[in-house]
Image (tube, grey):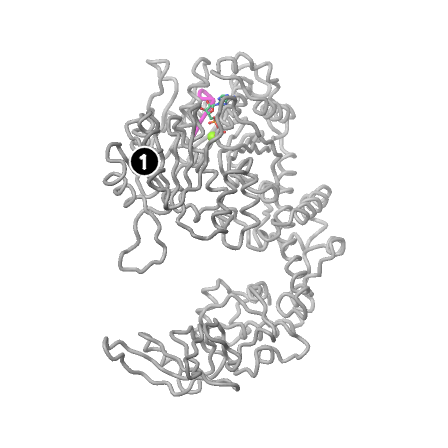
Amino acid sequence: MFSEPISKYFRLQVRQKEALKKLGLETINDILFHFPSRYGDASELNLIQNTEDKQGVIIYGSIKNISLGKTFKTKKPVAKATLTDNTGTIYITWFSQPYIAKMFPENSVVKLEGQIQINSSGKKTMINPKIEHAETIPNNIADSLFDDDSIHLSPYYPESRGVTSLWFYHAIQKIFKTKEFAEIIDPVDEEILEKYHLPNLKSALIWIHTPRKRSDAESARKRFAFQEVFLIQLQKQREKALALQEKAYAVNKKLSDLKYFTSRFPFELTNSQSAAITSVLNDLEKGHPMSRLLEGDVGSGKTAVAAVVSEAVTSTNPFNQNYGNLQVAYMAPTEILAKQHFENFITYFKDSNIKVGLLTGSGCKKFPSKVRNEVATNISRAQLLKWVANGEIPILIGTHALIQKSVNFKHLGLVVIDEQHRFGIEQRKKLARKDKFFPHLLSMTATPIPRTLALTIFGDLDLTVIDQMPAGRKPIISEIILESERKKTYEKIREELNAGRQAYVICPRINDPDPDVETKLNLKSVMSESDRLRKDVFPEFSIDVLHSKMKTSEKDSVMADFESGETKILVATSVVEVGVNVPNATIILIEGADRFGLAQLHQLRGRVIRSNHQAYCFIFTDSKSEKTIARLRAIKTAKNGFELAEIDLQNRGIGELSGNRQWGISDLAMEAIRNIKMVEFARAEAIELIKDDIDLEKHPDLKEFMEKRKMIHFE
Ligand code: ADP
Ligand code: MG
């Protein structure tokens, strides 16, 4: 029953069908797990007689005296009606919505949402309220929603026009009465639930949909939040355990063995970098695949770590061979970054005889070139792939193009991944092709995320943190700039530009919105802000733009001009190529900063900490809210990105955790992630369970549940 379509059990009108579809609800199970977004109770009743002037209300009642006319001057259609409940009457006007008269004939029972206005004579009116059909007229909301007097909290569902909370209430009551519901199977072990005082599935479903007290609803939510994280942990811990069952090429090197390589660097490794390299080398010895995450702020030197580790791998012979090299695949999220890593690797590997290849959608390169030893050369994709397949090119850097079928390594020892949040066991297996050895995995990220989120989404990886910046770096000066200080700040920037530095200007969007569409948000756009800066602010400097809608070739030439210093100011959106390395760019100005999460601001700021010149981050906001400005100030005081991510996490709800969706976990799991204890419990239980039941043979219900949700696959 649970996986069957809703329409099999409920007679649905067209508008209800459409509304359910819009909400993404197809099966009985979908409605059962469509949770209320809030609960009302009798004290929240909106009876007409209790409403006050300027109050935002939801009112149920019946429509009467509906009429359609035209406005006096502009001749626009205007619909009028009254709404009555048992306690009073409201006079309603809808402008330019003539269809309302047709859709809601006399005596329709409706739900209205809008603001009440009371005029001097005490007459209550509403202008343009939201209106939708309701099933019954309530005396009061508690009665209306519930036949059962003992229930006091009424659920409000995230609604869509056409299907009301009341409909959900009745639908769910009907499901609750079925035999199937009585026998619903709980995927989570009873012992685990008892240990953490969480309700079982059946109670939790009843409590979340029709709680008698708020605490019931809360414990139900807690259970589902726990369940979400527990399932993710199970999935990750299982992947981790599966990886460990595989064989990998053993690499037996100590950091001291690699002195010949590191001594060519123009700098000393920081202690943090050395420790990170050592922890990786310890993993590589073991003959089982490493799964490690290297976390470090932008500029902390992760690429250098990857280079040293790559040297350790490529200077190792394949298993049972005293010739040849193990290979390294280094995958970056964008072409620009792939190219930049390629350039960096050239500087690290130029004095060794290791060849480095670059594979992207728009072209391939090889270093060194045959004719000139110190430069890279363009080669055909076919040629590059041939050399990768026969092992002649030990290091291949690229974008997602690296995991295409056509790319075959001879002896792939290590995969290095930059800023990819998911690179599961399936992808590793694919990369290994037919090799019986699994590649080691070094995943690197500068994305400041809270610890609980890291423990969850990277649950399959062991964690190493680089918490030290290379010596000689001056801390970046970050300032919150209010509108009144704009001019002064431009002068400060002009000084820096005159001294030879370069600047980024980040805008929240690419283009101005359609001028015909009214918008309250007055956000700066890359296109118009770059025009304004050219004309009115920095006419003496060359200004260019970069954004995600540009072609790769355009982006490349823009970046090349900026890197060469020809372009002084680069106006860009936030989405483009965080991590691009232009050491001479020491200023970043962020427009509309209140729109960004702190962690995101921190990441943007990371673009200007690449050199030994003093760097500046100017955070512009025209917000007048004390709270917003106080929040932004945290960026001046926080020690690192991870601390800022924690603050964002606590502020969520207003969408502060930037790119919440990007982590691919549900809102409920996000809720759990705010609770470190819960995440740790879930993790501990998952580790325990997987330890002696990797394929969940002893937990068939759980296994089925996870298979259904496509969280685990069995061949
Ligand atoms: P990340 O990838 O962590 O953002 P990179 O590895 O790109 O950082 O390093 C940023 C810059 O710092 C590069 O120009 C690199 O050459 C330099 N760098 C790396 N390690 C050190 C170090 N120990 N001392 C000084 N400079 C370093
Ligand atoms: Mg990097």
| Label 1 CB less than 8 angstroms from ligand 2 | no
Closer to us: 610 or 236: 610
Q: Quadrant of the C terminus?
A: top right
- Give the magenta range: 391-398
Q: Amino acid at mark 1?
A: Lys
Q: Which residue bears the numbered disc 1?
A: 555
**Badge 1 density bin: few <14, some 14–19, many ≥20, Cα 10 Å:** some
Instruction: Residue 13 in the image: state x and y as whole percent.
Output: 46, 76
Residue at 32% x, 75% y: name it.
Answer: 95
Q: State left or right for residue 120 relative to residue 414.
A: left
Which of the 4 quarters of the picture holds residue 516? Answer: bottom left
User: Where the N terminus falls, by quadrant?
Assistant: bottom right
Residue 104: % across, % down: 40, 81
Q: Secondary structure at mark 1?
A: helix
Q: Position of residue 392 (x, y in %)?
A: 45, 20
Compared with 122, 482 (above or below) is above
Viewer-side residue, 457 vs 696? 457
The vertical placement of 348 against 697, above or below, is above
Residue 69 screen position, x and y as percent: 29, 82
396 or 683, nearer to the observer: 683
Q: Is residue 392 magenta?
A: yes
